[in-house]
C-alpha cells in the first residue's frame, strides 16, 4: 500500500514539471483586434430659445381649512396666456401664515415675494402625560353557588 501511494505521488510530480512549456489556450492563437475605434458622431447642441408659443389662459383657486387638525392653506392663480400671476399661503407651526405672491413668464422666469403674517410663538413644551385609556373592569360574574349534595354511599353494610 505504501509503495502504491509513493508511486502515485511520483507520477503527479513528473506530470507537473516546471520545465514544460505552458499550454497556449485551447489550441488556437488569441484573436487580434481588426476594428478601428468609432468616430465621434455628435453635432453642436441646438439652441433651446426657439419661438415661444403662447399658453392657454386659465384661472383657478382652492383653499383648505381644517381647525381640528390645524390645517389652513390655499392657492389662487390666473394667466392671460403669457404671464402667470398668483398667490399661495400656508399656516406655519409657529402660528404665522406664509404668503407667496408670484409672477412667471417666458422671459423673466419665476419671481416671488415671500411675506409673513402674525408673530412666531414658541410656547414652553409641556411634558407628555398620557391619560389612561381604560378603567378597572367591573366584575361580570358572582361567586358560583354549590350545585352538589352530600354524596350517598353506593354500597350496603358489610355482612357479618
Image: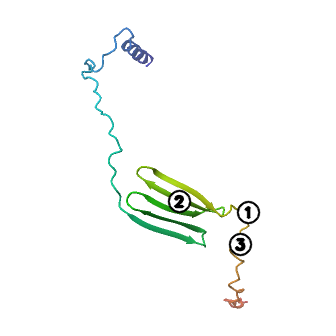
> SS at mark 2?
strand
In front of the other: 67 or 81: 81
| First in sequence: mark 2 vs mark 1 | 2
Q: CA distance from mark 3 to mark 2?
A: 47 Å
Q: Nearer the viewer, mark 3 or mark 2?
A: 2
Q: Few, some or many C-alpha atoms within 10 Å of disc 1 (few <14, some 14-19, many ≥20)?
A: few
Residue 76: percent from the left, percent from the top? 48, 65
Q: Residue at x 28, y 31 (%)?
A: 41
Q: Which residue is mark 2?
A: 101
Residue 96: percent from the left, percent from the top? 64, 63
In front of the other: 107 or 27: 107
Apparent side of residue 81 relative to residue 101 in the rendered image (left or right): left
Q: Residue at x 61, y 69 (%)?
A: 70
Apparent side of residue 24 relative to residue 118 in the rendered image (left or right): left
**In the rendered image of this protein, does residue 90 appear above or below residue 109?**
below
**In the rendered image of this protein, does residue 150 appear above or below residue 134?**
below
Residue 82: percent from the left, percent from the top? 39, 57
In front of the other: 50 or 1: 50
Q: Few, some or many C-alpha atoms within 10 Å of disc 2 (few <14, some 14-19, many ≥20)?
A: some
Q: Few, some or many C-alpha atoms within 10 Å of disc 3 (few <14, some 14-19, many ≥20)?
A: few
The reply to whether callout 3 and callout 1 are in contact (CB within 8 Å) is no
In front of the other: 40 or 158: 40
Q: Which residue is mark 1?
A: 123
Q: Which residue is mark 3?
A: 132
| First in sequence: mark 3 vs mark 1 | 1
Residue 50: percent from the left, percent from the top? 33, 46
Amino acid at each position: 500500500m505504501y509503495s502504491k501511494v509513493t508511486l502515485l505521488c511520483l507520477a503527479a510530480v513528473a506530470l507537473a514539471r516546471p520545465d514544460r512549456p505552458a499550454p497556449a489556450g485551447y489550441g488556437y492563437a488569441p484573436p487580434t483586434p481588426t476594428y478601428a475605434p468609432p468616430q465621434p458622431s455628435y453635432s453642436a447642441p441646438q439652441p433651446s430659445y426657439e419661438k415661444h408659443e403662447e399658453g392657454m389662459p386659465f384661472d383657478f383657486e382652492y383653499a383648505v381649512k381644517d381647525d381640528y387638525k390645524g390645517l389652513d392653506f390655499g392657492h389662487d392663480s390666473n394667466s392671460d396666456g403669457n404671464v402667470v400671476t398668483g398667490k399661495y399661503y400656508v399656516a406655519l407651526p409657529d402660528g404665522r401664515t406664509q404668503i407667496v405672491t408670484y409672477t412667471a413668464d417666458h422671459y423673466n422666469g419665476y419671481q416671488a415675494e415671500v411675506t409673513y403674517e402674525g408673530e412666531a410663538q414658541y410656547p414652553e413644551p409641556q411634558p407628555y402625560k398620557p391619560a389612561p385609556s381604560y378603567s378597572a373592569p367591573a366584575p361580570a360574574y358572582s361567586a358560583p353557588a354549590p350545585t352538589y349534595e352530600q354524596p350517598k354511599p353506593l354500597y350496603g353494610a358489610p355482612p357479618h
